[in-house]
Amino acid sequence: MPRSRSIQLPDPVGLHLELDRSSPVPLYFQLAQQVEAAIAGGSVVAGARLPNEVALADQLGLARETVRQAYGQLTDRGMVARKRGVGTVVMSGYVGRSLGLSSLYDDLRRANQEPSTTVLGRRVTPAPADVAAALQVPPGARVLAIERVRYAAGAPLGLLRNWLPETHTDLSATELTEHGLYELLRARGVRLRVANQRVGAAAVGARDARLIGERRGATVLTTERTVYDDNGRPVEFGRDVYRADRYYFEMTAAVSAPGTRSA
């Protein structure tokens, strides 16, 4: 049985799958990850119908239960939906993103998700204590506060709140509408180097829910982040809220050797 199979979807879209039967990674997980990567990368478009479980199992030489598990995982993650009389359909606007330091605007553009931005607020304001601590400036120092809604393919994806030191108060609402924040900082000579980021979950409040098209009290993904330049100076502090049904973070983790302790 060859490791690599090319499956033609009805759209048509080519779905290239490589399953390694010698790998300790379960086959259902390999299958789900590769289909998910194709969806997130834009090579399998929203609205495409995936092959039914029996057909795909036959084409790949797998048990039907293996394909069912893979499709179940994709359904749980919101990547696909199973519709009676139609089959397994790829959902629109689901975005995956690495936990590394990257621009959401650039990530969406690379994934053909047609990013757009509405700037809700842009003002120079005294820094609250927590913002001042993150940016390493005195409490009450002038900072630029920005609030934006980011859209993917015309649908609201997340609410972005950012604070920057006074040196960047020249960023205009027009620039922030047309470009990603990190793109603008790099254009001003800022070398973004590293971020300290915390990812969590919370029940969304009424205002934030309305802005991202979610119901009040729904669970959303949250991030809190401080970004540093190559001199170790804080250049941005951010708090973001994302729709959990359209957005996820991914990471690669090394497995510790037996007998070692993880932090």
Image (cartoon, rainbow, N blue to C red):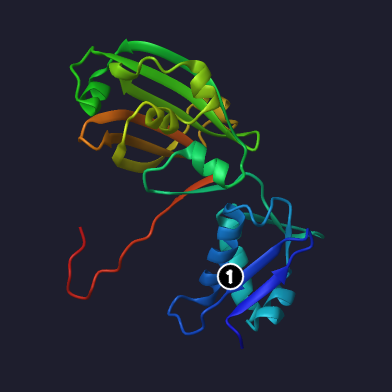
Is 46 placed left or right of 199 in the picture?
right
Which residue: 67% across, 57% down?
Answer: 44
Q: Which residue is mark 1?
A: 69
Which residue: 38% across, 42% down?
Answer: 200
Q: In which quadrant of the rendered image does the N terminus lie?
A: bottom right
In the figure, 53 relative to 211: above or below? below
Question: Is residue 244 visible from the viewing direction of this image?
Answer: no
Find the residue positioned furthest to the bottom.
1
Query: Quarter of the image holding residue 188?
Result: top left
Q: Residue 215 at x, y = what percent?
A: 58, 33
Is 180 placed left or right of 154 in the picture?
left
Q: Residue 40 at x, y = what percent?
A: 57, 53
Q: Residue 19 at x, y = what percent?
A: 55, 77
In the figure, 67 relative to 153: above or below? below
Question: Is residue 100 visible from the viewing direction of this image?
Answer: yes
Q: Nearer the viewer, residue 118 or 228?
A: 228
Q: In which quadrant of the rendered image does the C terminus lie?
A: bottom left
Which amino acid type is shown beneath numbered disc 1? Gln
Is 244 placed left or right of 8 in the picture?
left
In the figure, 81 relative to 202: above or below? below
Q: Nearer the viewer, residue 179 or 19?
A: 179
Q: Residues within 10 Å of mark 1 (few under 14, many from 20)?
A: some
Number of marks in the image? 1
Tell me the element at label 1.
Answer: helix
Q: Nearer the viewer, residue 39 or 189?
A: 189
Which residue: 20% across, 15% down?
Answer: 139
Query: Quarter of the image holding residue 246?
Result: top right
Is 94 placed left or right of 81 in the picture?
left
Q: Residue 86 at x, y = what percent?
A: 80, 59
